[in-house]
Image (cartoon, rainbow, N blue to C red):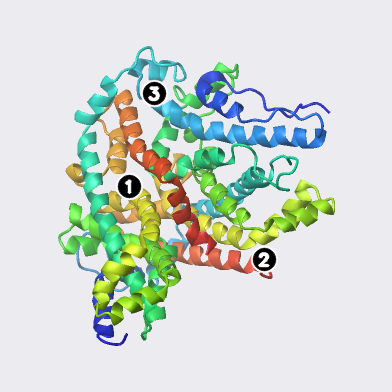
Amino acid sequence: MKTTETPAPRPAESGAGVSKTDALAPKPDRRKKEGGVLNVFSHGVLIIWAIMVVTPLLWAVMTSFKSDSSIFGSPWSLPDKLHFDNWSRAWTQANMSDYFLNTVLVVGGSLIGTLVLGSMAAYVLARFDFPGNRFIYYLFVGGMSFPIMLALVPLFYVVNNMGMLNTIHGLILVYIAYSLPFTVFFLTAFFRTLPTSVAEAAFVDGASHTRTFFQIMLPMAKPGLISVGIFNFLGQWNQYMLPTVLNTDPDKKVLTQGLVQLAVSQGYKGDWSGLFAGLVMAMLPVLGAYIVFQRQVVQGLTAGALK
Amino acid sequence: MQHGKYRFIVGFLAVPLGLYALFVVWPFIQSIYYSFTDWTGLSPDFKMVGFDNYTRMLHDDVFWKSLQHSLLFALVLPLVTISLALFFAFMINVGGRRRKGGPVISGVRGSSFYKIVYFFPQVLSIAIVSLLFAFAYNPDSGAINSLLRGIGLDHVQPLWLGDPSLALWCVMAVLVWSTTGFFVVLFSAGMASIPTELYESALLDGAGRATTFFRITLPLLWDTVQSGWVYMGILALGAESFAVVQIMTTGPGGPDYSTTVMVLYVYQKAFRDGQAAYATTIGVALLVVTLAFAAIVMRLGRRERLEF
């Protein structure tokens, strides 16, 4: 049997990706013919999907360095020279710096709020017996399966009536509220796994419940907080639906809605290279955070579904 | 540990629960109430109209189209995504070659590399992914058609998002692209917890890879697959499909409403057409569809739980 299942070589547009993944493919093993063919096949399929995942991203990076005419004229050609001006233009003229700052403020505030409030609620629900405990727990957890869209229409008017439409703090509070279901679910399970003896010892030594929580339990829960924190960071950084509805002031836009608006707006007509630079700028922080913390990201994301 | 217990509990729960009730639970309840009114959302006045909105919905062609598309999303997307992910995860974790003296089953070389790369799209905002693919799909100067021209397929130049019969599939393909990696990682984690003795004895009995997959891996992974299915279905009915359809397709949900989905229709009715009450009615329908979907999957997927 010959190794005919070797996948057809892909076009050279993502040369770097191909050579890197190709190096990982095993050479056909003559001694175990069947296994060898199967291995080439499985590697082939895996490599093709890897290329399919990486190509659009590399293409975006490449395009962000090209001039407008070559973006439309020859989408796959390499840039004639590296147009770094696309990046500086996007950053300054296309308001990317403002969107970035808004996103950092909103996500920073919501992330801290989500972790503090989520862990407080989860701690109480996990460690204390009181009437209504189960009800509150399921009330929180049930939120994970609500279609958010249904609540969005009245939510708009709730936020409006409180005078918090188009404000950073309004958006922060709403982000926190919508992040609580998963956070409480995840951290409740986590607090249950922590040993009770330490907390009891602290309590016997005269620490109040509050102090026990902040000085003993919270530090012990650090791994769980990191996992759920990164999960929330990604979700809140990428949030699109909530700001689209609650935040229509051009000055307060966050990255995702800012980019979408740039893409459709007339005022930005023509500067596609700048838009691509903006897209890549918005991708980098999350891809970076993911690569650094990928173990915790995976833990955080899989915990919910595996439990 | 009784001293001051209730004061502490109330103190710790008040703020999170208050925020959650105010911004999530209360709007949720309100929206069901509003669906029985004629509220426009523009003025504070409204009156009860009973089931009028529901009757109107049943005679609304666009609603039926959006329902049809949403159901297609909820059926096709999990099926494709989860099948692909199961296949990849099995290849990555069990597809490796047997090495002399090594473990009976092993992942392919570079398995952690694949897992990291496959996950990339999952961390990107669906809004950014949608923008990127909207460019790629552009019929004249987009990357995909230009690639087709490059390999000599000049006559195959679809309009992609501009073609009513293709647009919906283009949009779905983007969601498959962006979510498969998550399930690969999820199923990999599940497969890692299956004891290797089970594989060893199966291999001793002469089982091939397909048999191993269908007789060992899939049954033991069933719970994860099922919850993944529900999770994906909820996403496909809700937030994810909103962003892709709203950003990628033109006009009111694609050419000739060919891509409109229920979430998008809710959004348009509420925030574009000033028909807040009718929007919440469609929202209620969406809730019913979501719950029914989850219930059906849980029911059809129920089988004896395997302990290992």
Furthest-left residue in this view = A163
Nearest the viewer among A205 and B22 is A205
Q: Residue A46 placed where, x, y %?
A: 62, 36
Q: Which residue is mark 1?
A: A237
Residue B27 visible in the displayed image:
no
Foreground mark, 3 or 2, reads 2
Q: Is residue A132 left or right of residue B74?
A: left
The residue under the point 59% across, 37% down is B110
Q: Which residue is mark 3?
A: A63
Foreground mark, 3 or 1, reads 1
**Secondary structure type for disc 3:** helix
The residue under the point 38% across, 70% down is A140
> Which class describes the residues within 10 Å of circle 2: few (<14), some (14-19), or many (20+)?
few
**Secondary structure type for disc 2:** loop
Determine the image quadrant of residue B9.
bottom left
| Quarter of the figure with the C terminus of chain B | bottom right
Q: Is residue A286 left or right of residue B224?
A: left
> Which class describes the residues within 10 Å of circle 3: few (<14), some (14-19), or many (20+)?
many
Q: Which mark is residue A188?
A: none
The residue under the point 45% across, 64% down is A145
Could you tell me how far apart the alpha carbons at marks 3 and 1 are, in whole angstroms? 23 Å
What amino acid is at disc 1?
A: Trp
Q: Which residue is mark 2?
A: B308
Q: Residue B145 placed where, x, y %?
A: 51, 24
What amino acid is at disc 3?
A: Thr
**Secondary structure type for disc 1:** helix
* Vertical relation: B131 (above or below) A114: above
Q: Chain of mark 1?
A: A
Q: Chain of mark 2?
A: B
Q: Residue A283 placed where, x, y %?
A: 36, 37
